[in-house]
Structure formats: structure tokens, C-alpha cells
Amino acid sequence: MTTELQLLLKTARDGDETALGTLLESYRRYLKLLARVQIGQRLQGKADASDIVQETFLDAYRHVQEFRGDSETQLLAWLRTILAAKLADVFRRYLGTKQRDVALERSIEEGFDQSTMILHRGLIAPGSSPSRRVSNQEEAIRLADALGQLPADYRDAIVLRNLEALPFAEVAQRMGKTVNSVEKLWLRGLTQLRKSLETSQ
């Protein structure tokens, strides 16, 4: 964790809500992307990823003093655990079950890990030198931020194709477009994403 992030976390624990807000905001796009993939695979757009991330942040505000970690990895793991519980609540609501299901929360967290690995491995420009790479987690956060800045059609095509692993025909159906137009959006999106990542290194 950088000195700046450590200072923000310490200040947030001391009750500074502005510091906590700044800290959480740096993970918004990453957490939203993880939530979106899980919703897309299980509920196909019936829930809103932004709302779930906002609920995650509200829980983090309420319980920040209970967080005992001192690294970015630990902070992100804590936030992902809260997010998994929030998603599990949404799934239970839509699926009509009432009891908490720890196995479901674990399954969601495993899905987060898989999405992070795909983000790191599959979407980063091939041939990036190892000396220019940061950790998988930091890279995934950076990539989620870059994805969040793409036009919506590019982003949707990449998320559905690469993270949800849908065939182009299903991506086209979900987006209400032809397969040919989706393939072009996907290629343009990947090109723009890779350029964005290269310029931000």
C-alpha cells in the first residue's frame, strides 16, 4: 500500500469520512465490474451493479473501524467480502430463498478471482514487459478504470465476450445488435483499451 493510501486508511479509521470516501472511490469501477459480471451470469441484468457497490460502500462506512488490515490487498479483500455478501442477498431475493448461504458467497468470491485473472491475463496488451507490470490486483483495478472510460458499446462487448465468456451470437442478442457489428465493436474496444493502458503506464 502506498504511503498516500496508508495515510487515507489511517485517517478514515480515525473517523474522517472524506478520507474514506476518497479511498473507496478508487475501487468503484473495479468493484462495479466484478458485480456486473456476477449479475450478468446469474440474473442477466435484473439488478444494478452501481446500486450494489453503493450498498457495499455504505457498509464499509459503517464498519471501517472493524477493518484490521494494513495493506491494499487486505482492504480490497475486505471490500470484496462485503460485495459478495451484498450480491448473495440480491440473488436470494430474486431466487426466493431467505437464509444466508455461505457457499453462495464463496462461489461469488471465486467468481471475483476468476474475473480478476481474466482481466489480468486476457485483456492486457500482449508483450507488456514484466518490469512495467504491477501486481495482478493493481493491474485489474487499472484495467477496470480504463474499461469504465470506454464508450458503453465497446465496454459491453468486451465485458460480455471476455469476462462473461459469451459467444458473439449471444453477445449480439444481449446487446440487440448484429454479430458483425458486435465483432467490430469488440475489436475497436480492445484496441482503444490497449492504447489507453499503454499511455497510462
Image (cartoon, helix red, strand yellow):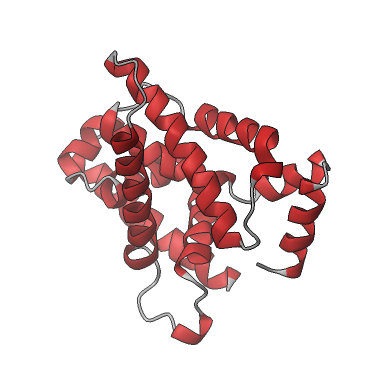
Q: Nearer the viewer, residue 57 or 139?
A: 57
Numbered circles on residues, count:
0
Q: Nearer the viewer, residue 188 or 76?
A: 76
Left or right placement of residue 152 versus residue 24 in this view: left
Left or right placement of residue 26 versus residue 169 in this view: right
Point out the image quarter for the C terminus.
Answer: bottom right
Which residue is at a point 30% across and 26% down the rendered structure image? Answer: 43
Point out the image quarter for the N terminus.
Answer: bottom right
Which residue is at a point 48% across and 63% down the rendered structure image? Answer: 137
Across and down, in percent, residue 88 comes to 38, 29
Left or right placement of residue 170 versus residue 81 in this view: left
Task: Evaluate whether residue 151 shows in this view.
Answer: no
Which residue is at a point 69% across and 36% down the rendered structure image? Answer: 61
Above or below: residue 114 compared with residue 177: below
Which residue is at a point 52% across and 72% down the rendered structure image? Answer: 198
Q: Nearer the viewer, residue 26 or 8?
A: 8
Across and down, in percent, residue 84 comes to 43, 38
Task: Evaluate whether residue 122 shows in this view.
Answer: yes
Across and down, in percent, residue 65 comes to 71, 43
Across and down, in percent, residue 165 comes to 23, 48
Left or right placement of residue 139 versus residue 89 in this view: right
Picture quadrant of residue 119: bottom left
Picture quadrant of residue 17: top right
